[in-house]
């Protein structure tokens, strides 16, 4: 691999991370607001409040990531992408719930601060690292990925026009 293609790959990674970060920042605010509304105002338990907030934030994240962060990547079908997205977000939710469960049931912490630190800082942070890696690996594929090529060929045989990427990298 020459220096030019290596530099280009790093630039693409930085570009994707920046967009993922913007979408993630917005969805993080949604997650924190909804989880605190559910727990602090509605009195819903820690794990249930985090589950509701993650579902709302993940839906926002899918829309933002599919249509902006990873718009230049291959499209392999809404059903396939969204199914994988839901599964990977369930794993991310599991990471956040594990952090909350340890804080609440192992460390016996029960303050709003502990709820936010365990679930919305540590849990969401670890889950975000996992999700960025997993989305790139399985959901929003590089156009040269064999699965993306297979889906593009199938769509072409069906006479479906593939969407053009929005914007340049």
Image: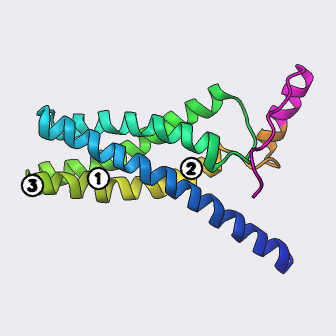
| SS assignment at label 3 | loop
Q: Residues within 10 Å of mark 1 (few under 14, many from 20)?
A: many
Note whether 156 is above or below 27 in the view shown.
above
The quadrant of the picture occupied by the C terminus is bottom right
Query: Nearest the camera: 167 or 37?
Result: 167
User: Which residue position holds label 1?
Assistant: 120
What residue range appears in magenta? Answer: 150-169
C-alpha gap between disc 2 and disc 3: 31 Å
Q: Main secondary structure of the magenta part?
A: loop
Q: Earlier in the sequence, mark 1 or mark 3?
A: 3
Residue 155 in the image: x percent, y percent?
Answer: 84, 26
Rendered image: mark on residue 109: 3
Q: CA distance from mark 1 to mark 3?
A: 15 Å
- Dot 2 or dot 1: first in sequence order is 1
Q: Residue at x 30, y 59 (%)?
A: 122
Q: Secondary structure at mark 2?
A: helix
Residue depth check, mark 2 versus mark 1: number of the one nearer the observer = 1
Q: Is residue 126 left or right of residue 155?
A: left
């Amino acid at each position: 691999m020459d220096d030019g293609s290596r530099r280009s790959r790093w630039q693409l990674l930085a570009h994707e991370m920046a967009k993922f970060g913007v979408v993630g920042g917005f969805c993080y605010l949604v997650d924190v607001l909804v989880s605190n509304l559910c727990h602090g105002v509605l009195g819903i338990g820690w794990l249930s409040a985090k589950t509701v907030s993650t579902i709302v934030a993940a839906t926002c994240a899918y829309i933002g990531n599919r249509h902006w962060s990873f718009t230049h990547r291959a499209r392999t079908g809404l059903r396939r992408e969204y199914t994988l997205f839901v599964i990977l977000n369930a794993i991310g939710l599991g990471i956040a719930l594990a952090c909350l469960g340890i804080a609440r049931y192992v460390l016996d912490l029960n303050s709003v601060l502990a709820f936010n630190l365990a679930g919305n800082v540590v849990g969401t942070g670890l889950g975000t690292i996992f999700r960025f890696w997993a989305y790139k690996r399985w959901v929003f594929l590089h156009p040269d990925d064999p699965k993306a090529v297979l889906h593009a060929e199938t769509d072409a045989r069906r006479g479906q026009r593939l969407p053009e990427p929005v914007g340049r990298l």
